[in-house]
Image: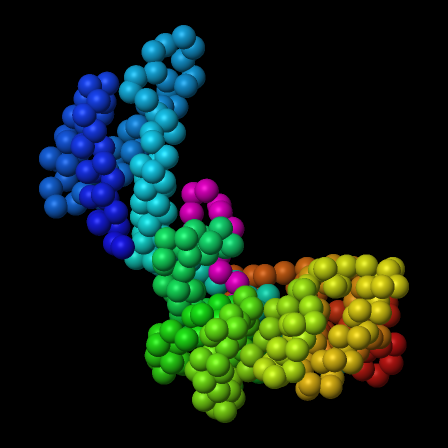
Amino acid sequence: MTVRTQAWGVIAGVLGDSDPAGAAIRQRLSDRLGENPGAPERALLEYLLERQQQDSAEASAPDTARFPQPVSAMPPQLAERLESLRSLSRISSLLENQMLMTAFQPIYGLESKAVVGVEALSRFVSDDGAGAEIWFAEAAAVGLGANLEFSALASAALAAAKLPANLYVSLNISPVSCLDPRLPELFEHIELPVDRIVLELTDEIPDEEYSHFISAITPFRERGLRIAIDDSHPTAGALSRMLHLRPDFIKLGRNVISGVDTDTSQHALAACLVDFAEQIGSVLVAEGVETAEELRVLTELGFSAGQGYLLGRPSVRPKDWAAWNTPLDPDGLRHLAANHGIQGPGGS
């Protein structure tokens, strides 16, 4: 449903109310419609902004009559439609004005002791500073989730042109969006080679969509595309699915990594997953590495790569990306060797 259709629905709900107490509300909304001919969504948003300002002013004034009633006092169904309209407008404006940018976080090869790839992370330009997960959740709730995903993918692919050419680029995508015809179109129109792209699946593949997912993604895997499973909860079912999918990368989060250096159970779980990844030919990546001891133990266990604030924070600056072109400089290697217990080239 479009923003304009939603707007007319809300406007009809307000103007159709016959309660005499709401006459002033209806008149103000009618005035906004007259001032914005042909643009009901703009009229409604101006009206809502005026209502919010008035509600805030009246809430801070003690013992005054609250007339008209605040938006929060509207009937639940109408309030939900208003909230949906706000979300539609926010996401539509974001997409129209391309108010997002890409940060890259380095992925560090524990054997090569160099950056081997990056993960693309969306950063949104907004007054409220809402995180990426909030934006994507809000977009999904109003049916614009895929639109925002593909906007973020296009932004990341464009920014990747400034990355060192030896790094792979991990792009976050939901399995459902892998079935979208816009994915092959994206691959055809971006300059980033398919064999440098890793699609990092953000959700589990629904059982009813699994065969469609395999059919959609196989032609690209044959051209060099790689798949990563961001699997922070390695259940038996998830491991069974991975036996068939055989992802190129398995990424494990803090619920596995945290305590790997102090908790025997966590250590045993991590060791089992290292063996599992080796058996199916996947690269095991530790996400959220935060301490030197965690890094030391993960390296000893045989994790292939690590990612986290200890190894490198996300950056939107091409100057930082350029520094990932080569292995760590000697000072950096000595720092890692001294603090992480990792032997660098040519000695400890």
Q: Residue furthest bottom?
A: 222
Residue 275, quarter of picture = bottom right
Residue 272 locus on image (x, y percent): 80, 75
Residue 334 horizontal side relative to residue 12, left or right: right
Residue 171 visible in image: no
Tell which of 133 and 8 is nearer to you: 8
Verify whether residue 74 appears in magenta: no
> Which residue appears at 69% of the width and 85% of the height?
280
Q: Quadrant of the C terminus?
A: bottom right
Residue 145 horizontal side relative to residue 97, left or right: right
Residue 204 locus on image (x, y percent): 56, 68
Tell which of 35 and 346 is nearer to you: 35
Above/below status of 235 relative to 113:
above
Q: Which residues are magenta?
A: 120-131
Above/below status of 336 relative to 60:
below
Verify whether residue 121 appears in magenta: yes
Residue 303 locus on image (x, y percent): 76, 76
> Which residue appears at 48% of the width and 45% of the height?
129
Residue 155 locus on image (x, y percent): 42, 67
Residue 8, quarter of picture = top left
Residue 293, quarter of picture = bottom right
> Which residue appears at 69% of the width and 68% of the height?
235
Above/below status of 12 relative to 199:
above
Tell which of 56 and 191 is nearer to you: 56
Residue 16 visible in image: yes
Q: Quadrant of the N terminus?
A: bottom left
